[in-house]
Image (spheres, rainbow, N blue to C red):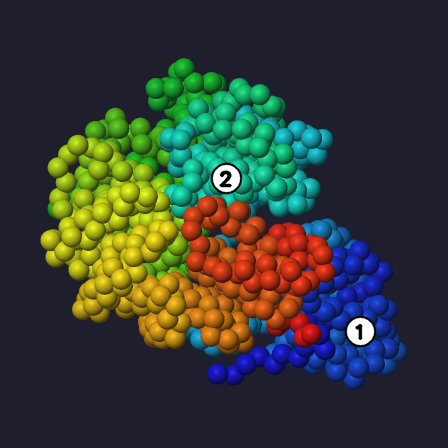
Amino acid sequence: MSHPHIIRTPDQRLRIFVSSTLQELAAERRAARTAIERLHLAPVMFELGARPHPPRELYRAYLEQSDVFLGLYWERYGWVAPDEEVSGLEDEYNLCPPELPRLLYVKSPADNREPKLATLLARIRDDDRAAYKYFESPKELAQLIENDLATLLAERFDQSRALITADVASDADRVVEPVRLPVPLTGLVGRDADIAAIVDRLEHGTRFVTLAGPGGIGKSRLAIAAARAAAQDFDDGAVFVDLSAVHDPRRVPNRIAQALGVRDTGDAPILDNLVTALRDRRILLVLDNFEQVLDAAPLLTGLLAAAPGVSMLVTSRALLRVSAEQSYEVGPLAEDSSVSLFVERAHAVKPDFEITPENADAVARVCTALDGVPLAIELAAARVRVLSPAELLDRLDRRLSVLVGGSRDLPERQQTIRRTIEWSTQLLAPEQRRLLARLGTFEGGFTLEAAEFVGASGEGDGDGDGGDPDVISDLAVLVDSSLVSQHDSDDRPRFTMQAIVREYAREQLQSGGELDRARDAHARYFIDLGARARLPLKGGGQREWMQRLGDERDNLRAAERYLLDARDWDRAAELAFNLFLYFWVIGLLGEVRTWMDEPLESGDTLQDRTRAIALYFTRTIRFWKDPDGRVAADLSEAADLFRTCGDRSGEAMARISLSLALMAGEKPDTARAAEVMERSLRLFQDTGDVWGESMALVLLGRVALLEQKVHTAFERFDESLALTQRSGDAVGGRIAAYHLGWAHLLLGAPEEARTDFALSVTLSTSLGHIEGIAYGLEGLAAVAALAGDVDRAGRLAGAAHALRERSGTHNGPTFTFHQRYLDRLAAVSPAGRLAAAVAEGRELTVEQAVAEALSEPHLN
């Protein structure tokens, strides 16, 4: 395998060559330098800027000894010297070696950009070797540079990446982050004054603002725009919490935690983990669609009290009516803005549509009839492909006056949007209305495949086996009618519905007696999806399926909820068990435990396999809390039940958890744990389960470590890592590499340990497995401590600790020994130096921590 050339400064720091004009970007150059140095990298900057008479050979030499080219651009092209054809700015870009990564940042707005710079930027945009981003402020630029350089370092960590299979390596720089603000597909019209007013409140200390108004008035879009404008005043930015799929107020903490990347591991109440994650952060939370979980409002005031750096922007059709709330009424659009919105949305279906003297009055009257409600205007504008504005007005006048849709008791503008949805559906064919209704069963969006299955179920033989051309064409009509929105997710089209449209769709299912039938079709699709995911999740398809299931998280929850409410315990257990690996990696085992408590507590007689699965999920996450041996006994029962029903893979899985329970007490029963794991290993080998075999080898290695048989442990971990590499299993690989790192360290091979821990970090990063990243950072902290590198050891340890707190993985047991190495280092280091480094590490972002971990250690 060829490695990218890496030339480091004498202190082993990577060089970042910064190219820009000088005076107009002075503040941005300072921000870039600060960002680069915060990552412990070396900026290469000519303080005279891009000079008109550049010493070209000098530039070329510096560029060839740099690791990254970083370009900053705004309005000036720079001076072109006599006898030269290009400025120094363009010359530097031209001299950049082809293999050098290029990170380019363009400041906006730029009303007076010089033509030659515009030409250069057009060429750069077409260069597929360059990453090209826009920014508005030095602060925003600094954050972009830090994030991009950190992920670039993870991507280019050659020694670790050589060990990763191509399937995982292609995404090795991805880290699971909080759910940042969505990027709307269309522009926001007529809300500049609202944005300014909301931002002003947040800037002047208001911590809890509720944007109130009827459905379809544009609260969500306004909240996102206002949060984007205010985010630069929050050190940790803004995070979007979509509550549209949450119907139980008790699940609100879980949804906030999910948006923040806080895991529900089940070892502590999720609310406690949430408070820990937020208490030291300055962050703006945008909570969307709160009207359906109003009983959770006191939770928000509790979080504000516990986390003084948190502010909240809430959208709701009704006020929350709790202390600290300030309301902001979101009203209709003014007439000129309504017309502008109509024209913009009409262009999506009829690109040549324009306001003319002949249609101007009709368009204005349409917008007036729709009370300036944005969603109603969008639905009407979608019809201009087949109806002129005058015809549209005529139909609206005739239909809106008689359509009430059971909504007489709703506020006036709420009636407007409900009537407009009903009017819009009246223009559909019956099969299109039926499909819209059935699509209302989805939560958080759906794929074309899922729409085909659920849309076709119930017709003909009822198989809903997909591929129905009628469903595809009907869905296209719903998209064209603005009742469904389409956007792409990793080359797969994905569809969503606004909350109020989805409510309407479900009401149609309910009134037609079709709701249960449609929900069962929805559940059947996701049960099948889980069954298809089970095997690839353990090997080469891991990365793809983790992402695909992540897109479907709300639908998986909805399917599970339907099955549990129907007391369909067998299918509920099957869905959960097939996706065990997914739920574990993303940190949802605490929620799954609450699901599986329901069949156990139902009083119903359960099938053996269903009881085994329920025992497994509810006891596995408590394996270390077993003072009376009850957990171990229940896990042993689960293993026996799996064996009785012939599920050898299930039995082997249960035995892994049983072994952990046997090793977790004050007096570990290593003899029985070894016996349990030897059978588990044989079962995995007999069934061809390579993932399970690699996990069993890790557990056998841990038994050997407890028995102080380090060489035996090393052999087990090494064999496990080899298995994961052959199968493309990143989850197993990160676990095996981490354990192998400790074995190497205990055997006196710190450099080999560093390679192992770095591989564990890289694989964890590729999966977005936050707990795995924390483990790897702790291992690397131990290596640095052993080498006497106080600053690096402290920063890595501090980053790991903060990461555990912010991700909710700080309460359970951990298999790590780094603290003993830190304690020894502290005893021989200058007073307070290690503590200061730990404090510095706590301030690192995930990306910065990964970059620190994967960079070469400084030479002493």
Residue positioned 37% across, 71% down in the render? 709
Viewer-proximal residue, 652 or 356?
652
Viewer-proximal residue, 218 or 623?
623
Report the label total: 2
Q: Which residue is mark 2?
A: 274
Quarter in which the C terminus is drawn:
bottom right
Viewer-proximal residue, 664 or 47?
664
Viewer can see residue 498:
no
Instruction: In the rendered view, tell whether residue 14 sits above or below residue 662.
Output: below
Question: Badge 2 local density, few (<14 within 10 Å), some, or many (20+)?
Answer: many
Residue positioned 42% across, 40% down in the render? 268
Instruction: In the rendered view, tell whether residue 537 sits above or below residue 322.
Output: below
Viewer can see residue 699:
yes
* Marker disc for residue 147: none
Q: Amino acid at mark 1?
A: Gly
Image x and y of residue 218, in percent? 53, 33
Going from N to C along the chain, the mark reached first, 1 or 2, is 1
Image x and y of residue 557, in percent? 33, 42
Question: Badge 1 local density, few (<14 within 10 Å), some, or many (20+)?
Answer: many
Q: Please tell me in which quadrant of the rendered image residue 784 appears.
A: bottom right
Instruction: In the rendered view, tell whether residue 311 sits above or below residue 177.
Output: above
Determine the secondary structure under disc 2: helix
Contact check, label 1 and label 2, Cβ < 8 Å:
no
Single out the residue that lies furthest toward the right.
82
Image x and y of residue 752, in percent? 50, 76
231 vs 259, left or right, is right
45 vs 70, left or right, is right
Residue positioned 43% across, 37% down in the render? 269
Q: Which residue is mark 1?
A: 88
Single out the residue that lies furthest toward the front.
667
Residue positioned 33% across, 49% down in the render? 623
